[in-house]
Amino acid sequence: MFPSLSRRTLAAALPLGAIGFAAGGGLIPAATAAASAAPAAKAAMPLPGRVALDPTHLPPPIRRRHAVHHTVVLDAKEVLAEIRPGTTFRFMTFGGTVPGPMIRVRVGDTVTLTLRNDTSSQMAHNVDMHAVYGTGGGAPATLVQPGQSRSETFRAAYPGAFIYHCAVPDFLDQHISSGMFGMILVEPADGLGKVDREFYLGQHELYTDGEYGAKGEQQFSFDKMIAEQPTYVLFNGADKGLTGARYGAMAARTSERVRVFMVCGGPNLTSSFHPIGNVWTRCWPQGALANPPQRFVQTWPVCPGSCFVGEMELPLAETVNLVDHALTRVVRKGLLAQIAVSGAARPDLFRTS
Ligand SMILES: [Cu+2]
């Protein structure tokens, strides 16, 4: 199937890499896994009533310089969770979180991906990965009814940060809006540069029958989706969830360099991704890591079905607000994530007078 990676080559090259994740986020060591293996995917256990993925919970950078085989298990789960305190919604998810867990491999690696649809699900689901050559990005091969499980094997043939999302026929927009998207990161052969911290965010919009802030369980509104008028625009499925006022801000220290991975699920809105009080020192639009980075970019569009990789220097102790600069989405629809930077003052860079 993969001429450059015969079974013998795989067996020799990989005592490793084969890790999946289960519904609750537990790691499942595959038969070929070894203790030294770095996980290809890592999922967080969501707190009760919480669907937001911890943005610091992602697999570590890849240091090896040879191909391996990964076994990844994704669980399609429909979960009732809070959009905001007192307001709930039946999210559709990969792994019980929004976004779904990051899958991290190196170009040339092979992946056996299993999609399991939980027995409690009400819908069929599948997964289209933009890192995959193949019909529908693998969607027809992974279509699973509740309680079903199917697998596919692919080679990550090109580098970049790519979305994966549910692509179930006729209702893929509803399923993505309800939370079924995540990122598969295919690192270039030489890896990514060293940074001090990495964060992983997913933006999407939610169309509910109630108005913004309405209490109780909200139902999905097809009318609002057809009009492309969302009730909520969110990072990680929660109304201002990744902030000090709610689940907590991401933490960093001055003089550190951080890398932010962002996947835009949409299904319809393009994000104008901007770090307030800072700038993208280096960024890779569309997550196209094979290209040279852009420098000192203020705001970059991240369209639905795409990703963004950006790095920031943090010279100042400040709160960096990550936003979509279509700011009505911030002020009135719930979109905000914060990086709280601690450290010494730098009056040479900024001071009040
Ligand atoms: Cu689905």
Image (spheres, rainbow, N blue to C red):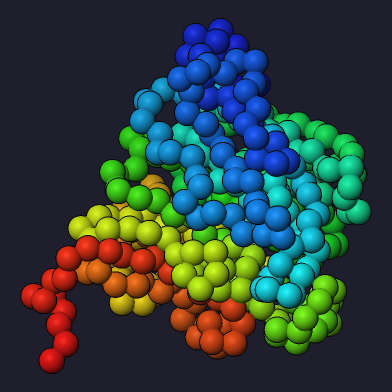
Q: Is residue 343 above or below residue 12?
A: below
Viewer-side residue, 223 vs 220:
220
Picture residue at 40% right of the left edge, 51% below the top:
198
Picture residue at 43% right of the left edge, 38% below the top:
60
Q: Quadrant of the C terminus?
A: bottom left
Give the image location of residue 131, x and y in percent. Answer: 58, 44
Q: Residue 309 vs residue 2: left or right? A: left
Q: Quadrant of the N terminus?
A: top right
Picture residue at 50% right of the left edge, 86% below the top:
327
Q: Is residue 326 above or below residue 193?
A: below
Residue 107 shows in this picture: no
Viewer-side residue, 290 vs 184:
184
Picture residue at 55% right of the left edge, 69% below the top:
246
Query: Which quarter of the picture shows residue 205?
Result: bottom right
Give the image location of residue 135, x and y in percent. Answer: 73, 43
Give the image location of residue 152, x and y in percent. Answer: 72, 32
Q: Is residue 326 above or below residue 52?
A: below
Give the image location of residue 351, x and y in percent. Answer: 15, 82
Residue 187 shows in this picture: yes
